[in-house]
Image: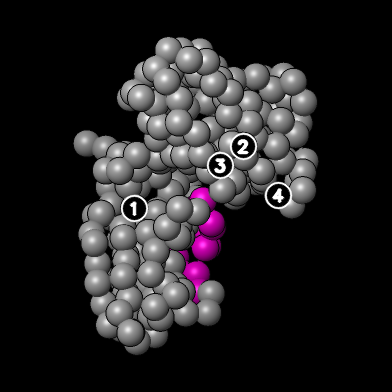
Amino acid sequence: QKEVEQDPGPLSVPEGAIVSLNCTYSNSAFQYFMWYRQYSRKGPELLMYTYSSGNKEDGRFTAQVDKSSKYISLFIRDSQPSDSATYLCAMTRGGGSQGNLIFGKGTKLSVKP
Amino acid sequence: IAGITQAPTSQILAAGRRMTLRCTQDMRHNAMYWYRQDLGLGLRLIHYSNTAGTTGKGEVPDGYSVSRANTDDFPLTLASAVPSQTSVYFCATRRGVEQFFGPGTRLTVL
């Protein structure tokens, strides 16, 4: 079993829809959970991260972590065509020498006008 | 320089040739990373450096080497390129738990 599993999609939604992106993981030592957005032919950019379990909201984006289920989610409200990108989940045990990230393979999202 | 720069942007290379991908940052972050990204396989860590003078192996280090002579530069060398090293290569730095990525180098080995 891979440490981090993410459905590659592709996922296609109409503009204005609520999008749910998810990852599961197997290593209970992970403490930090990230979501990166990657536009075509660009480097990944960090959207947001959370520490341990709980929710975090930033504008139209909400990240949720359920450590008991080893399941994380990213919700996008009122999706826009500009949200079309590949979304990568990533996680780590912590900073310092433990700061190496483990990435999911990414979910490709397309938001149609 | 703003953030992380990578050079070249893209390159076509004959198999067996030596190639160095360059990465320079101006953020003074101690930790730096090299990843490769392949369709269906996602981002995989090649090598990393937690601070100048130290390096470590990631998930897929074979065929690659790195050096970290100073804080700002972290070059990745392919000693003798093979077609399976065709990929997009990303350099990254870390501040705390956040990683910041460069624009990437698209490498094709024929």
Q: CA distance from mark 3 to mark 1?
A: 23 Å
Q: CA distance from mark 2 to mark 1?
A: 25 Å
**Quarter placement of the N terminus of chain A:** top left
Q: CA distance from mark 2 to mark 3?
A: 5 Å
Please name which of the two marks, 4 or 3, marks the residue nearer to the observer: 3
Residue B53 is at least partly visible in this image: yes
Give the extent of the magenta segment. A43-57
- Which residue is under mark 2? B7
Circles 1 and 4 on the same chain: no
Chain ID, mark 3: B
User: Of the residues shown, which amino acid type is indicated by label 2?
Assistant: Ala
User: Mark 4–mark 3 contact, CB under 8 Å?
Assistant: no
Disc number for residue A106: 1
Disc number for residue B47: none
Disc number for residue B9: 3
How far across and down, in percent of the image, does residue B43 sit? 40, 40
Image quarter for residue A67? bottom left
How far across and down, in percent of the image, does residue B32 sit? 63, 34
User: Mark 4–mark 2 contact, CB under 8 Å?
Assistant: no
Please name which of the two marks, 3 or 1, marks the residue nearer to the observer: 3
Residue under the point 72% across and 41% down: B25
